[in-house]
Every structure is written in C-alpha cells, then in structure tokens.
Amino acid sequence: MAAATAAAAGPVLWRRLLGLLPGRPGLAALLGRLSDRLGSYRDRRRRRSPWLLLAPLLSPAVPQVTSPPCCLCPEGVHRFQWIRNLVPEFGVSSSHVRVLSSPAEFFELMKSQINVAKRRVVMASLYLGTGPLEQELVDCLECTLEKSLQAKFPSDLKVSILLDFTRGSRGRKNSRTMLLPLLQKFPEQVRVSLFHTPNLRGLLRLLIPERFNETIGLQHIKVYLFDNNVILSGANLSDSYFTNRQDRYVLLQDCPEVADFFTELVGAVGDVSLQLQADNTVQVLEGMVHPYKGDRAAYCKAANKRVMDVINSARVRQQVLHAQTFHGDSLLTQEDAAAAGDRRPAPDTWIYPLIQMKPFEIQIDEIVTETLLTEAERGARVYLTTGYFNLTQAYMDLVLGTRAEYQILLASPEVNGFFGAKGVAGAIPAAYVHIERQFFRELCSLGQQERVRLQEYWRRGWTFHAKGRFTGTWRPRSP
C-alpha cells in the first residue's frame, strides 16, 4: 500500500509537504534533499545512454600503492592491499571474530563486557537513550568504576564516551543528564565528549529548533570497546537497538592493535569536541578552536590534522609490524595456538577501518567504496544493506555500469524508523520506496534486474537499521 501511494504521489506530494514546513527548516532540508533526489532520478533516466558503460572508467582510479607488497605473503593474498595506503591494515584470526545476530545478544554482551573491563571502556554513538535499559548500562558503568576504586587507588580504569551534541542534548532528560552522575562521582576516570558539527553555527544555529538541527550534521561513529575487545556496529545506545531494531554487530575478541586504534580515533574526535562538565555545561579543550564560535576553516584544519595523525601513525605502525607480527616465528596454526594459549594464530581476516568526515575533508570511505564498486567485475558478488535506500549518483552509475552481481537488502516501509511517525516525517518511508521503485524501473529498462536484486527486510514489530557493504564473498577478477 505504501509503495503504491509513493509511486502515485511524485514530486507534487513533496512540493505540498515542503509548503507545510515554514517553521521547520531542518526537516524541510531533509525532505528537500529527498525531493531533489526524486527529480534527479528522472533527469538521469533521460540522460541514460551508452555513456553509462563508461562509468567505471570515469570513476576515481584505484589509489597508487606507495609501499611494496609484503614479500612473505603469497601472491594474490592481498588483493585489497592498496587500502592500507589509506588506512591501517589489521590482520586477525577469524577465530577472534564473532558476528552477533540479535539486539538482545548485543545488549547482554555490552553489559557483560562493561562488568569485566579492567583498563578501558570506550563508547562512541550518536546518542544514549533515557529509558530503563539505557540506565542499566549506566549502572553497569558505575558498578565497574566503583569496583576499580576498591581494587586499586588511583584506578587504572578509564571510561571515554563520545556522543553527538545536538542529538545528545535533545529534551530535558537526555544523554547528558543520564551521564552527569558518572562525571560527578568519578571526575578523574570519566570523560564525555559531545561532537558539534562546524556547519551548525551563527544565525542557522539560533533559528533551527531541536530535532531538526540534527539534519545539518552529526557524529555517527558506532564503536564499543572494552580492554582489547571491540564491537563494531551501526547500533546506537537506545532501547529499540537492544530489543527490536535489527542492526549489525561484529565482536573482535582480544585484538589489542584494533582496540588501540579505535581508542585513539575516538580520543581524537573527542579532543575536537565539546567536553561535558559536572554542572552540565560544556567546554573546549585548552588551545582547541571552538567548533561553532571559532573560525570554521581553522577548526576544520585542526580537526583534520588531529584525526589524520591518528590514522597515519597507525597505518605506518601496522605496515612496520606486518612482517614482524604475522610472518615471524611466533605464528602457530590455529590448533597449536589453542594448545599453547598464549601465542597468536595466523591471520586470515583483514580489517580496514574506513573513516568519513567530510567537513574535515576526510573522505576515505567514499574513495574506497567507489574504487571497490569500480573494480567489481563479472564473477564478483557484492552485498549491500541499508535501512535508507538513497544511493548517490556516483554509486548508482557504478552499480548500473559494472558487471558484478549485486544483492541489495533494504528496509520495507513498515520497518523504516519513520514509519507511523506523526506529521510530515511519516511520509519519509514512502519517499524511500518511491526512490527504490524508480531505481528498479531503471534496472528493468536496462535489462539488469537479474544481475542486481533488491530485497526488503520485514519482521512484525521490528525496525531495520543494518548498513554494510561487501559482507559476502568476494571473488577477484580472473587473471
């Protein structure tokens, strides 16, 4: 029903919806972007021609690999080794990788990991909710911090939490008020950083109300680590993500290099963020440019340097350690490693943390994604999943112009987070369905509906938030 409504509505619906929003510029901006995207599909379809076949050639070239391949690795093992010229490459054993399947499993693992943490807890999320489940997490942190003080004073345990300023400050009871007791009780051990986009400033910041100001820019890293265990996810710290909002969750167990990197990365973003104080005020670190009061160019330059220093130092460090760590005498087979208990099994899984912070001119994720899509030739299979189907024109052209098989998993309108919302926001799922239908028509017109398959996730009473790329098998191009 929603799909049929969306298809019939067209741009007239969006002009009417935008006309209803004179006092809601933030949501108007979001709907405006969707409206522009709907119109751009029509324009691109008119322009479709044999030029589409040149899409891979017109896309960014594969970045030059400045460091030579590892001479100890078998030829062909590092098809993706060019990525390590952009970000650090971490080799781990698949026995240390565990994929979680449900929100409840994610929530219980979070609590158990907090309870046993001895040295560090680092949590980066869009926001922390205000319900009883979120309070359980805060209580777990408090309990662990108290135990650490009893065991040793001063305690080695440090807790660092990075959230978005606008989302974390929404309403009277919010992420900040949830965390204030920890700051007040453990001032030497707890740090709460609130990232504020440099794009929300001046008159714009004064005029756009709560909720809608979040459309200007957000902190969207989702990583949760406890000592040397890391959970990479798209889930926020909110009750629906612990109960009935399906997301992706990958646990990396006993991966100290990965944990160190994300600790440094979250710390770097935290350094350029506002610091929450025990009285619920915020301050910048001494010597740091203010994100919305200071000069925007100076702030973005300083933030770029702080984040890129972490990425580059880790990248160089991993290149130097690659042969020592993964090709030295300390490596064992998985069976021998299990018997020895204290030596690392050979790596068979490679992790590349991709970073995207466009206000700071950091677009590594974009470069790598476009390159991978460009290189996806016949025989390759690409899996994409998203809760919000809204491909950029560059990605759309690459999907339609290359010969790989694609399986794209989307949220059905009923499991979209905006489904059933009051007012204009309730129309957003229909907009995404309309974009999906237009894309499918284009697939059909090009005779590619067998090569590119679209599937919708649906589960009664649930919502869908999983986002990922290349999570399935990848078969490299034949020589």
Image (cartoon, rainbow, N blue to C red):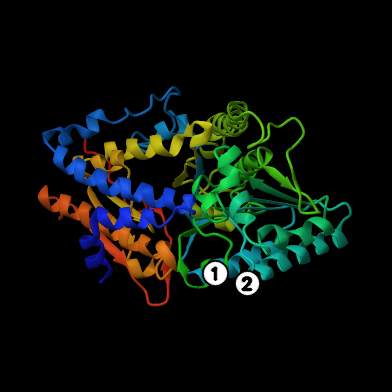
Residue 242's label in the rendered image is 1
Whether residue 380 can be seen here: no
User: To which quarter of the image does residue 176 belong?
Assistant: bottom right
Alpha-carbon neighbours of circle 2 within 10 Å: few (<14), some, or many (≥20)? some
Q: Is residue 444 left or right of residue 133?
A: left
Work out whether mark 2 precedes mark 1 in sequence or the reverse, and give the earlier one.
Answer: 2
Quarter that holds the N terminus: bottom left
Q: Is residue 49 left or right of residue 267?
A: left
Q: Position of residue 329 (x, y in %)?
A: 56, 39
Q: Are the residues flagged by discs 2 and 1 in contact, CB closer than 8 Å?
A: yes
Q: Is residue 310 left or right of residue 44?
A: right
State the SS at label 2: helix
Q: Nearer the viewer, residue 40 or 348?
A: 40
Q: Residue at x 45, y 24 (%)?
A: 67
Whether residue 3 can be seen here: yes
Q: Residue at x 44, y 29 (%)?
A: 70
Quarter that holds the C terminus: top left
- Image vertical order of residue 351 relative to residue 180, above or below: above
The residue singled out by tag 2 in the image is: 133
